Amino acid sequence: MTLPAAEAAKLMMSVTEAGGATVVALVVDSPYKDYTGKRLAIVESTPGAQLNIHGGLGSEALDKKVSELMWDALQDPRSHDGLRRVETDAGTLELYLEVKRAVQELIVVGAGHIAQPMAHLGALLGFKVTVLDDRPDFATRERFPEAERLVAADFSNPFADITIHSRSHLLLVTRGHKYDYECLIRALKMDPPPAYIGMIGSRRRVRATYVQLLDEGIGHDLIDRIHAPVGLNIGAETPEEIAVAVAAELVMLRRGGTGLALKDVERIAERFFKEDEGEGQT
Amino acid sequence: MTREDDRTLTDALLAARQAGRLCVLATVVETKGSTPRKVGARMLVDPATGLVGTVGGGCGEAEVIESAHRVLGSGVPERVRVDLTDDLLSWSPAVCGGIMDVFVELIRNE
C-alpha cells in the first residue's frame, strides 16, 4: 500500500511543524514497473522517538532495505536530498529521498524597523516567524505579512504565551535596551536553552549589559551563548542591512560556514592562474 | 522551497485529492551545475486550476508541462532531463549551465 503524494506532503508539514522529522522515499525508476511512483515515509515524531512507517514501495523486503537507507539519511545532518540506488534481484531501483527536519523558529522580540526586514528574510530562509511586542499596533498583519504569529506581550514576562524550545532562535530588538535586557535574562535561564539568542547593541552597550549580567550572577558560559553585537561583520548600517547581517549569521550557524568571503577562502586566481613571477629573469 | 511554497503546494494537492481530480506532479529529483530551481522543487499541473509552483520557468518548464500532458493521458510516469547547458556564454536568462532531472507522475486521487 503506497502513500499518496498529498498525504506525504501533509505528513511532512505537520510532523516538522510539531518538532519531528520525516524522510519520504519515492521510486523514480524500477525494474518492477508498477513500483514506480510509490512512496514510503518514516516519521520520527520527537528526537529519539521510535519510528513510524507510512506507505510502502511494493514489497516488505524492499521497504525494510529502503527504510534503513532513509534512517541513515536522517541521522546524517549533511545528507542531501536526491537520488539513491538500491539493488534488487531484478536489477537496480532508483529512489528519490527527501529529508525534512523539524521546523526552526525565529522569534523577533520588538516589532520596530529591524523586525520588518528580519521577519521577511526569516520567512524566506524557512523559519517559522513570530513577532512579539507590547504595542499591539506595531505587531500587525499589515506590517508583518510573512509572520506566522503576532504576539502582544508584556516585556516583564515576554514569553508567557509562547513555547520556547531548542529550535527557537530569539532576536532581541525591542525599542529600549531595558526591555532587551529583561528578555535576555529570561532567555538565558530557559530550559531547554534556545538555539540562538541575538541581541542588538553597540560594543559599548553590549559591554554594559555583560557587566550587569555578571553582577546578577550570570556565568561566563551563559554569556558566551549570546550573539551580541548581532550578525556578521558586513558593515551593516540600515535596518535592512542589519537584518541581512543577522540572516547571514543564522545561515552560517545552520550550515556550519565560516562567515568569510568565498573569494578569500577559494583564492581561485591565486591558486590556478598564478602569474609566473620569475619569468624572463635570470 | 520556502515554507510558504510547501504549504501552497500541499494545499493544492489536498484540494485535488478532495475533489477526486487527476493531476500531475513534477519534482526536481537531481541537478548538476547551475539550475534555476534545486532538488525538491515541485510543480503541480492540475487541469482544473492550472499550475501551482514552478520547476524553473522558460523552455525547461515547457518541456515538463508537455510531459505532464502525456502522463495525464498515459498514466505512465516519465523522467524529463532538462538540459540548460546549450551555450554557457550566451547571456540568455534561460541558459544556466546546468542539467535538471524532473520526475513527472500521475496523481490519481481516486
Image (spheres, coloured by chain):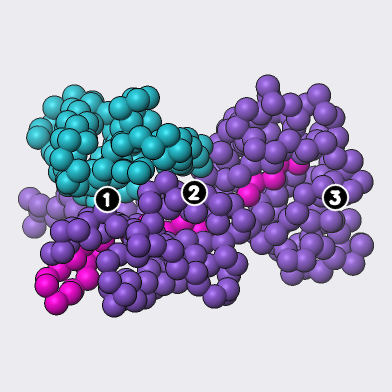
Chain colours: A purple, B cyan
In depth, the one of A269 and B40 nearer the eye is: B40
The image quarter in which residue A130 lies: top right
| Residue occupying image coordinates x 11% and y 72% | A90
Screen quadrant of the C terminus of chain A: bottom left
Screen quadrant of the N terminus of chain A: bottom left
Residue at mark 3 = A160
Q: Where is residue A140 in the image (x, y as percent from the top left)?
A: 74, 26
Magenta highlight: main SS: strand
Which disc number belongs to residue B29?
Answer: 1
| Residue occupying image coordinates x 69% and y 45% | A107
Could you say whether the residue bearing mark 2 is in a helix, strand or loop?
Answer: helix
The verdict on a common chain for dots 1 and 3 is: no
The verdict on a common chain for dots 2 and 1 is: no
Q: What residue type is labelled 2?
A: Lys
The image quarter in which residue A49 lies: bottom right
Q: Count residues near mark 2 (Cα–Cα under 10 Å), then give few for <14, some for 14-19, many for 20+.
A: some
Q: What residue type is labelled 3?
A: Ala
| Alpha carbon distance from label 2 to label 1 | 19 Å
Magenta span includes A85:
yes
Residue A260, visible in the rendered structure: no
Q: Left or right: B45 with respect to A240?
A: left
- Label 3 marks a residue whose chain is A
Q: Which residues fall within the magenta stretch?
A: A84-109
| Residue occupying image coordinates x 31% and y 36% | B23
Q: Where is residue B24 in the image (x, y as percent from the top left)?
A: 28, 38
